[in-house]
Image (cartoon, rainbow, N blue to C red):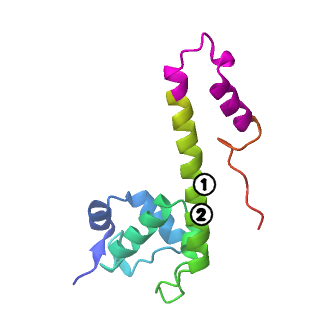
Amino acid sequence: MRDLDITEVARQSGVPASTLRFYEEKGLIASTGRRGLRRLFDPGVLERLALIAMGRAAGFSLDEIALMFAPDGRLRIDRQLLVAKAEDLDRTIRNLSAMRDGLRHAAACSAPSHMECPTFRRILRAASTGAIGARRKKAR
């Protein structure tokens, strides 16, 4: 299959050309040459862009994603990093579920004031201690 120019890669991947150039600067993708002023890419770049998109959707930084590729371009994913990210997502899901449930309760609560509602007060205490809503930084 022939190389794709940057416009074709942008069209097929949905990734803007400016982002493709940025990813190339960061070493996430590599062009194979040029046709006039346009960068050319191996068709395999589309799969790599899909992997980058999946990593971004999971919450990985571009630097973390870059570490998932060996210098020869093959994947070398640290499985412990995947487990840690999955645990982060579990915490986020629990926090968001608690916030959703609290909002639903507050919307339907029959107390004259939310401050008079025991459930709302319990949610408020949890928020004040960082148990819900706050993102804590991991020690590294």
x, y percent for residue 6: 33, 67
Compared to 114, does 92 lie above or below? below
Which residue is located at x 32 percent, y 58 percent? 14
Q: In which quarter of the image is residue 137?
A: bottom right
In the image, 25 versus 62, the foreground residue is: 62
Q: Which residue is drawn at 59% across and 46% down?
A: 95
Q: Which mark is residue 29?
A: none
Please state the horizontal and vertical placement of residue 84, each as a whole percent of the image: 62, 68
Magenta stretch holds residue 124:
yes
Stretch of the chain drawn in magenta = 105-127
Residue 29 locus on image (x, y percent): 45, 75
Which residue: 50% across, 22% down? 107
Residue wearing tag 2: 87
Q: Are marks 2 and 1 in contact (CB under 8 Å)?
A: yes
Residue receiving disc 1 = 91
Residue type (three-letter) at the residue carrying disc 1:
Arg
- Residue 126, image x, y percentages: 71, 38
